[in-house]
């Protein structure tokens, strides 16, 4: 009899917990998290409620806010519960297939990192964003699609050549990051003197003839401008979206505007604008000098109705890391500039979740059978 009463009490508590959690919404998707199947393995152990929260990205910047809302909804409101323990998980949503475009086996999302002109630090941003997503717990690949100027191998210190398995190329590894670049295939200092069709063929080989494995985010470092590589990428695969990198100067912003227009014309979502070389902080006195001006990227994003993902400071550590084959986020993850990259990556991941959800909402999956009311 005592055991039967305990079972009834536990069911009552679980049912009350479900009711308390039901109104909580995902802060990015604005839908009930219970309805979306994001609350799982709900259980009670003594006075503690335990559950797993499965997010759409491990890089979610709002974990603390979600945990606070859960605790506020449960503690003191559900009889017998005085604390909540949350276990975090992630199931990265993917870009759905698009008619006329081919999915890359194993790759859930493809992000194009673009710039309207050269010299804005696009490759540095792409590499550090890739490592920031990796540090957040995602599986990440990096494709150097800048065929004419493949700088990724230099910046990562990669000198070996990719292997093969079952007729497919194997990406190189720098830590946990999967990397592919034509710079690891050609002889050093050998120029790429190719016309458009050959460029397109090379890009498609790197997309479909490389064994990327299971990848949540494939970051594609594009050449500057609006040329053949951009067109091939946008027309070959269902691109999740593009990130546009700029510096604050007027000339860079003008070129970026054309790049944004190109992606919009190709119906590729623009996930946001990043302003690089935003300001230099003197390491001795702390004074900030806006060498290339500041704020132009934010103004451009607001004018175009696009998300502004953040400002990357002009810092010697960022440049030195790339020159020594040890990008900043990999070599000094606790540094100030590295934390900026991690915040930008978190906002980018949130944008990807929103774009995927809005374009093709996931089916609602209940977290489990409703607890029967006693």
Image: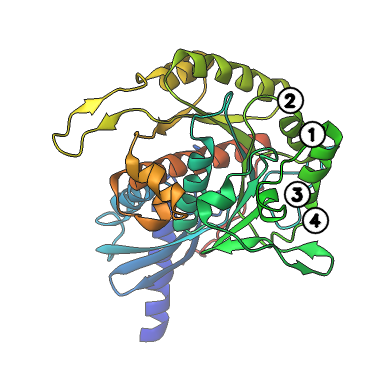
Q: Do the residues under discs 1 and 2 have CB atoms within 8 angstroms? A: yes
Between 121 and 73, the one lying in front of the other is 121
Between 198 and 85, the one lying in front of the other is 198
* Mark 4, secondary structure of its residue: loop
* Mark 1, secondary structure of its residue: helix
Percent across and percent down for residue 206 are 75, 50
Q: Earlier in the sequence, mark 3 or mark 1?
A: 3
Name the residue that disc number 4 marks: 209
Marks 4, 2: nearer the viewer: 4
Name the residue that disc number 2 marks: 266
The image shows residue 192, relative to residue 365, as above or below, that is above
Picture residue at 67% right of the left edge, 60% below the top: 171
Evaluate whether residue 211 shows in this view: yes
Q: Do the residues under discs 3 and 4 have CB atoms within 8 angstroms? A: yes
Name the disc covering residue 207, or none: 3
Marks 3, 1: nearer the viewer: 3
Name the disc covering residue 235, or none: 1
């Amino acid at each position: 009899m005592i055991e039967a009463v305990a079972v009834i009490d536990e069911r009552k508590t679980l049912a009350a917990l479900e009711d308390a959690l039901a109104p909580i919404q995902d802060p990015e998707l604005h839908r009930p998290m219970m309805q979306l199947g994001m609350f799982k393995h709900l259980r009670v152990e003594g006075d503690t409620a335990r559950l797993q929260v499965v997010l759409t990205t491990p890089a979610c910047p709002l974990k603390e806010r979600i945990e606070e809302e859960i605790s506020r909804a449960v503690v003191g409101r559900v009889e017998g519960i005085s604390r909540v323990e949350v276990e975090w998980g992630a199931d990265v949503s993917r870009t759905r297939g698009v008619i006329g475009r081919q999915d890359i086996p194993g790759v859930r999302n493809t992000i194009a990192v673009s710039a309207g002109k050269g010299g804005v630090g696009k490759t540095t941003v792409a590499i550090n964003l890739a490592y920031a997503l990796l540090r957040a717990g995602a599986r990440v690949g990096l494709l150097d699609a800048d065929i004419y100027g493949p700088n990724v191998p230099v910046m990562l210190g990669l000198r070996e050549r990719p292997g093969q398995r079952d007729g497919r190329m194997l990406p190189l590894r720098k830590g946990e990051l999967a990397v592919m670049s034509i710079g690891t295939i050609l002889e050093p200092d050998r120029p790429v003197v190719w016309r458009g069709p050959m460029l397109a063929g090379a890009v498609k080989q790197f997309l479909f003839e490389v064994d990327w494995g299971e990848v949540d985010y494939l970051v594609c470092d594009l050449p500057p401008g609006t040329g053949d590589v951009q067109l091939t990428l946008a027309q070959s695969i269902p691109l999740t979206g593009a990130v546009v990198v700029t510096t604050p100067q007027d000339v860079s912003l003008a070129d970026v505007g054309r790049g944004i227009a190109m992606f919009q014309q190709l119906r590729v979502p623009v996930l946001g604008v990043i302003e690089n070389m935003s300001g230099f902080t003197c390491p001795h006195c702390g004074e900030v000098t806006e060498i290339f001006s500041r704020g132009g990227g934010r103004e451009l994003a607001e004018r175009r109705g696009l998300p502004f993902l953040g400002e990357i400071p002009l810092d010697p550590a960022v440049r030195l890391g790339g020159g020594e084959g040890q990008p900043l986020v990999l070599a000094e993850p606790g540094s100030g500039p590295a934390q900026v990259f991690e915040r930008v990556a978190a906002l980018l991941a949130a944008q990807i979740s929103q774009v995927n959800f809005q374009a093709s909402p996931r089916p609602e999956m209940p977290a489990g059978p409703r607890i029967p009311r006693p």
